[in-house]
Amino acid sequence: MATAQQVEVERPVIVARDLRKRYGEVEAVRGVDLAVGTGETFGFLGPNGAGKTTTISILCTLLTPTGGEAAVAGFDVVTERLDVRRHIGLVFQEPTLDEYLTAEENLRFHAELYGVPKPETRPRVEQVLRMVGLWDRRGHVVSTFSGGMKRRLEIARGLLHSPRVLFLDEPTVGLDPQTRAHIWSYIEELKRREQVTIFLTTHYMDEAEHCDRIAIIDDGRIAALDTPEALKASVGRDRVEIRTADDAAAIARLRERFALEASVAEGAVRVYVSGGAEFVPTLFAELGVPILSVNVAAPTLDDVFMAYTGRTIRDAEATATERLGNAAFMRRRRR
Amino acid sequence: MSAATLEVAPVRLAGGGWRDDARTIWVVWKRELIRFRRNRVRIVTSLAQPILFLFVLGTGLSSFVGSSRTSGIDYRTFVFPGVLTMTVLFTATFSAVSIVWDREFGFLREMLVAPARRGAIIVGKALGGATVATMQGCIMLALAGLVHIPYTIPLFAFLIGMMALAAFMLTAFGLMLASGIQQVESFQVVIQFFVMPMFFLAGALFPLAGLPLWLSFLTRIDPLAYAVDPMRRAVFRAVGVPAAAMAQLVPGISWFGWRVPTPLEVAIVAVLGVLLTVIAAFRFGRTE
C-alpha cells in the first residue's frame, strides 16, 4: 500500500508522527503521519470506520494514542492536554448543545468555561452569532432549532474562543443538500475572516473538494495525501461512459480492439482512458456497435479513492464497518 | 452593525490554575440554576410527594396514633423535619441524574473537551445540585406554620444550613453513583435501591428509640439520620417540647451508649459530603 509522502509544510499547526490506536485486538489507526499548515483547510476523507474519528479524537486530546506522537498548536496532545484544548474548537458529529438553554446562554457558558475575558464576551458572542446568521434567534431555546441551525450554532461556539484550529467531524452529516451548501458558505466565510486552520473529516466526496489538501484514509492508514487537483491528476485517466444499442458486444469489442476492461454502471458502459476526449473519435470509428450517447468526465475524488484503495468508498464502508463494528460496540457497552 | 463590516477580533483567554477551577465551578453551578428555574413543572411535581407525606400520611397517622403516644405533640410537627429531608433527598438525587442526562444528550462532551479539570466540573455539579435541593427544601419550609412551628430566624437559619449540608452530601452521593453510569435507566434503578432505605432508616417518620438491634444498627450507618436528628431537635426546642417528651421522641443517635453531640452530627454530614465529592471526582476523571 502506498504511504503518505512527507510534504514540507510551512508553519505547521498540527503534526503527527506514526500515530497509532489499538482497541484490544483491533488497530483502528495504524501509523498516521501528517503535517497541516496554518490557515489550511485539511480534509480527512475515508469511509466510516476507516479511523477518521479515532485520529481526530487523538488530536483533540479525547483519546490517548497507543503509539506515536502528535502536537497541535505547538502542544503535545498527551502531556499538554489543557493547552491543546485552549487552542482548538470542536464540532462533533453528534450535537453537544444544551437544549434547555438559549443560543446565547450556550455560548456564554462556553465563553466562561474557556476563560474568554468578561468585557470581550459580549461583542464576541454577537460576532459569531451574526456570522452564522443566528443573532436574531439568540434568545430562543435551542430545542426549537432545526438541525442546520444547531450545527451552525455549534460552529459559532467552536469559534468563540478564537481557536487556532477548528476541528469539524463530519460537519454536514445528516443535513439536507441545501443546508450543507449553507454550512459550507459559512465555513469559507469564517476561514476568510478568522484565518483559522480547519481540520475536517468527511465521507462526502463533494465536501472534500472544498479542502486545500486531502488525506485519503483507508483501513487506519493514509493511502494518499495531496491537493484535490493533484490527486485527481495522479489518477491520470478520464472516465468515458457510452450508451450503446448492444452493451455486451461493445464490452467485447473494447477488450479485443482497445484492450480496455469495461464495466457497466448505471446503465452505461464505463472505461478509464488517458486523454478521454481524444479517444472519442477513435471509438466512434472503430467500435462497430452503434453509440447512442457519450460522456467524458475528468476523474473525481471517487475515482481517486478507487485508484488508491482499489474499491469505491461505499464498498470500503461495508468492510470497515464489519472490521471495526465489533470493537466499537464493545467499547460503547463498557463505558 | 452589519455582518459584512464585522472586524476580526480574536480573543485572548484568561488562564491558569485555581482561577480556572473557580470559573469552571461557577459556570457549571450557574447552568444548574438556570435549568432549574426554567423547569417549573419539576419544581411543582417534586413538591407533590413531600406534601402528600406531610398532610395525608401525617394527618392520617396522627389521628391513628393519637396525641398520647407523642406526648401531646402533633405527629405532623414531628414528621416535618423528616419531610424537609425527603424533599432535599429527592431533589438532590434527581439533580445527580442530570450528569447522566448530559452524557446521553451529548452536552457532557462540551464540558469534557473544555480546558477545565474534571474535578472542578464535579464540584460545580455538586454545589449546583445542592443549591437547587436547598431551594426546594425552603419552599417546603415555608409551610412550617401549618404544623405549629414558629417562624423564628435562628431556627430557620439552622434548618436551612442543615438542609444545605444534607443536600450537598446527597448530591455528591448521587454523583458518585452517576459518574460511572451511562444510561439514565440504569441510574434510576441504582438510585432507587438507595433512596427509600435511606429515607426510612433516617428516622424521618418514627423516632429512633426502642428499635430492635438490627434496625437500630442500620439507622446508625444511614448518613441521613445524622441530618434528621439535629433538625428535629431544633424544631422541638423552638416549639417548646418538655424534656421528658424530648427524650422519648428525639433520643439522639448513640454509639455504644454515647450520644453523638449535635456539632459532631453536623460535622459527619459535612465531612461525608466532601469525601463523596472527592470520590465522585476521582471516578469521573477516569471515564473517557
Image: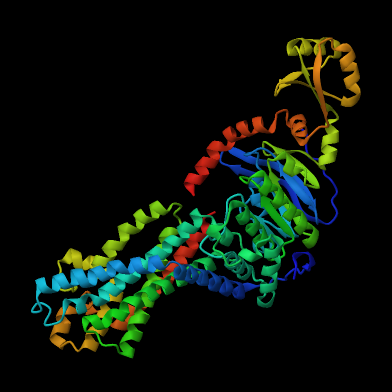
Q: Is residue A330 depicted above or below B233 in this figure?
A: above
**Can you see residue A275?**
no
Q: Is residue A263 left or right of residue B154?
A: right
Q: Locate the N terminus of chain A and report the quarter of the image it occupies.
A: top right
- Give me the residue at 35% from left, 77% from top: B139
Q: Is residue A335 depicted above or below B88 in this figure?
A: above
Which is nearer the eye, A40 or B271?
Answer: A40
- In this view, the residue farthest toward the front is A292
Q: Is residue B152 depicted above or below A89 in this figure?
A: below
Query: Residue A169: x, y in percent?
Result: 66, 49
**Can you see residue A87?**
yes
Query: Residue B226: x, y in percent?
Result: 29, 75
Q: Is residue B161 left or right of residue B33?
A: left
Query: Residue B112: x, y in percent?
Result: 57, 60
Q: Is residue B218 left or right of residue A319?
A: left
Image colouring? rainbow
- Give me the residue at 70% from left, 24% from top: A266
The quarter of the displayed image where residue B118 is located: bottom right
Q: How many marks?
A: 0
Query: Residue A260: x, y in percent?
Result: 82, 17
- Give me the residue at 84% from left, 40% from top: A229
Which is nearer the eye, B136 or B193?
Answer: B136
Q: Is residue A39 left or right of residue B64?
A: right
